[in-house]
Image: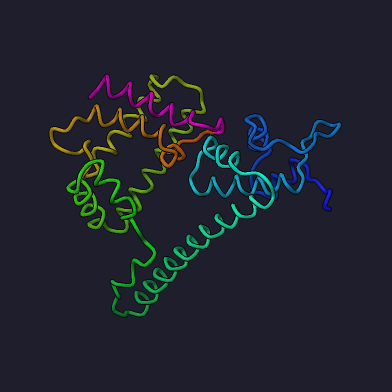
């Protein structure tokens, strides 16, 4: 029987996280320490490490802390945890395979460019899949919406795609910073981020925000609600407070902006 445990500082270093994050996981009941030493430091045993590994894996899969808590609550016991980790492992291997194919396709392109060889278009996009949400988009907004968006994406140059992805990343970062700062969603600072967000949305062909005569106000407000309801989107705005706090801030700021300007 392994009776060893690790201090919060050791776990933070080993897991590549922070003591603050681990304390937050304790505060919300997601990862309580195994014991608290006389000096007040939290300590974690083997089972706690396994639980933390599962938490971090689920975070990598895009789940928010509320959803992770529900997943963990549905399972208990080492055998169940081992089975759950096997599922995580299978998903990680799928992602590893996809990334491996992406790496190989990019390496092949680099070699062809440097050697002056002909590019093999059929091999250049192995592992890249922007069509994974096709069915969902078509169900929400119709086949024309997906076709327009797909045509727009395929028509971009690599530099344009990189710029677009950077814009998305910057928006997510600024939303989280605004939510964590404690400012009012109706404040000038939050409304400026909301303005940029709506400007970004209206630049994506196929969305109701970009369609002539579309109800942009209803679309923006509805999208804000979806950020809170759908953990895949809410994870993009999750703050250190956890849960849906960040997504709720985005929703509220977008509603204020839409009602005042759209």
Q: Is residue 133 above or below residue 237?
A: below
The quarter of the displayed image where residue 98 is located: bottom left
Q: How many marks?
A: 0
Where does residue 10 sit, x and y in percent of width and height?
75, 46
Residue found at x 71% / y 44%:
48
Q: Is residue 192 above or below residue 55?
A: above
Q: How is the image coloured?
A: rainbow
Residue found at x 66% / y 45%:
51
Residue situated in front as seen by the camera: 258 or 111: 258
Extent of the magenta region: 240-262
Question: For the stretch drawn in magenta, what is the main secondary structure?
Answer: helix
Where does residue 31 sit, x and y in percent of width and height?
67, 38
- Does the magenta portion include 116? no
Q: Report the residue that reaches farthest toward the left.
A: 213
Residue situated in front as seen by the camera: 7 or 161: 7
Where does residue 36 sit, x and y in percent of width and height?
80, 34
Residue situated in front as seen by the camera: 83 or 193: 83
- Does the magenta portion include 248? yes
The quarter of the displayed image where residue 83 is located: bottom right
Residue found at x 80% / y 36%:
35
Where does residue 89 sit, x and y in percent of width and height?
56, 58
Residue situated in front as seen by the camera: 248 or 157: 248
Left-right relation of 254 to 155: right
Q: Is residue 184 above or below residue 177?
A: above
Query: Which quadrant does the C terminus fall into?
Result: top left
């Amino acid at each position: 029987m392994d009776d060893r445990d690790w201090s919060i500082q050791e776990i933070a270093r080993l897991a590549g996280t922070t003591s603050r994050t681990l304390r937050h996981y304790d505060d919300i009941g997601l990862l309580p320490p195994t014991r608290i030493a006389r000096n007040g430091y939290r300590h974690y045993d083997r089972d706690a490490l396994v639980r933390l590994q599962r938490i971090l894996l689920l975070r990598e899969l895009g789940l928010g802390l509320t959803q992770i808590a529900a997943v963990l609550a549905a399972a208990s016991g080492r055998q169940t945890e081992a089975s759950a980790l096997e599922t995580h492992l299978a998903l990680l291997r799928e992602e590893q395979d996809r990334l491996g194919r992406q790496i190989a396709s990019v390496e092949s392109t680099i070699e062809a460019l440097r050697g002056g060889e002909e590019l093999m278009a059929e091999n250049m996009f192995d592992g890249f899949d922007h069509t994974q949400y096709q069915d969902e988009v078509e169900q929400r907004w119709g086949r024309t919406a997906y076709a327009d968006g797909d045509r727009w994406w395929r028509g971009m140059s690599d530099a344009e795609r990189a710029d677009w992805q950077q814009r998305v990343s910057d928006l997510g970062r600024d939303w989280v910073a605004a939510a964590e700062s404690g400012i009012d969603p109706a404040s000038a600072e939050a409304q400026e981020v909301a303005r940029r967000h709506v400007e970004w949305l209206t630049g994506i062909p196929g969305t109701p925000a970009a369609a002539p005569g579309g109800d942009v106000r209803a679309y923006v407000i509805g999208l804000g609600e979806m950020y809170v309801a759908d953990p895949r989107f809410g994870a993009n705005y999750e703050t250190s407070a956890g849960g849906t706090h960040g997504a709720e801030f985005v929703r509220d700021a977008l509603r204020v902006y839409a009602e005042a300007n759209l």
